[in-house]
Image (cartoon, rainbow, N blue to C red):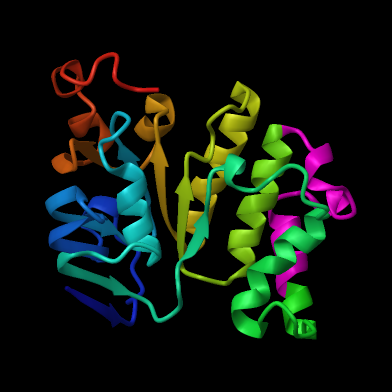
Amino acid sequence: MKIMFNKPPHSTAAPHDRPAHLHLSALCAGYPGRPVLREMTAEIPELATTALVGPNGSGKSTLLGVLAGVIHPTSGTLRRTGDRPPAFVPQRGATGDTLPLTVRQTVEMGRWGERGPWRRLTRQDHAAVDAALDRLDIRDLAARQLGELSGGQRQRALIAQGLAQGSDLLLLDEPTTGLDPGARDRIGALLTSLAADGVTVVQATHDLEAARTADACLLLRDGRLVGQGHPDRVLTPSALAGLSGRFG
């Protein structure tokens, strides 16, 4: 398995015409004794939003883990532009509500990759944290405990943590699950604006409505890629018919 990095070129092309920020070739990955992804070849465009869609067990979270670098492919090639580690925003349930962390402390954790958890943050680090808080419109929540927040507020805090890392690749696992329609729309609009500002955004989602607003889509089934391209061409009734009832 090879992982290669290249400098990202500037592009103003439409998402479907842009070069790939991530390119997977015959990629396989999984867990000891349990293969998940099978011979996956796909491209994810730069400076665009891409939705990973599929039923439970299709391999979305495993693929997201491979892109984040926390799961290592067993074979195949992963190539991406950029020279900074990707920013990974896990599901809200992966961060305990009972942790005694404020919103600011949560976002500051995004700078640990630069400083380590025990070193004092620099002026530049604090500026990055402030910018992320402002971008997510949660500066007024900075002193609040995570467990005191609504689901949408907490999700914005986690995304702010990802933004504070300063990466050009933002990966999110089910960012709108469990949120009310207003909060889902707000997160969706934010992800679109981030792509317009130079961040490649990839989200794994069960939410077909959210997936249809993305620039591109990868449709997975049983660890295999069964469709890729614009959501209008991928998420067709016939393509989804065999997956009916398997989303959760």
Residue 162 percent across, percent down from the top left: 59, 61
Q: Is residue 142 magenta?
A: yes
- Which part of the image, by quadrant, shows the C terminus? top left
Does residue 223 appear to the left or right of 197 in the view shown?
left
Residue 216 image offset from top left, x and y in percent: 29, 44
Q: Verify whether residue 70 appears in magenta.
A: no
Would you say the magenta stretch is mainly helix, strand or loop? helix
Q: Which residue is at a point 39% across and 42% down the rendered structure image?
A: 204
The residue sitting at 69% across, 56% down in the picture is 135
The picture places residue 229, in percent across and down from the top left corner, at: 20, 43
State left or right for residue 45 relative to residue 141: left
In this orientation, does residue 61 appear?
yes
Quarter assignment of residue 125? bottom right
The image shows residue 65 at horizontal and vertical percentages of 37, 56
- Return the residue nearer the eye: 126 or 115: 115
Q: Is residue 104 above or below residue 113?
A: above
Q: Is 211 situated above or below 202?
A: above
Give the magenta range: 128-150
User: Residue 225's quadrant in the figure?
Assistant: top left
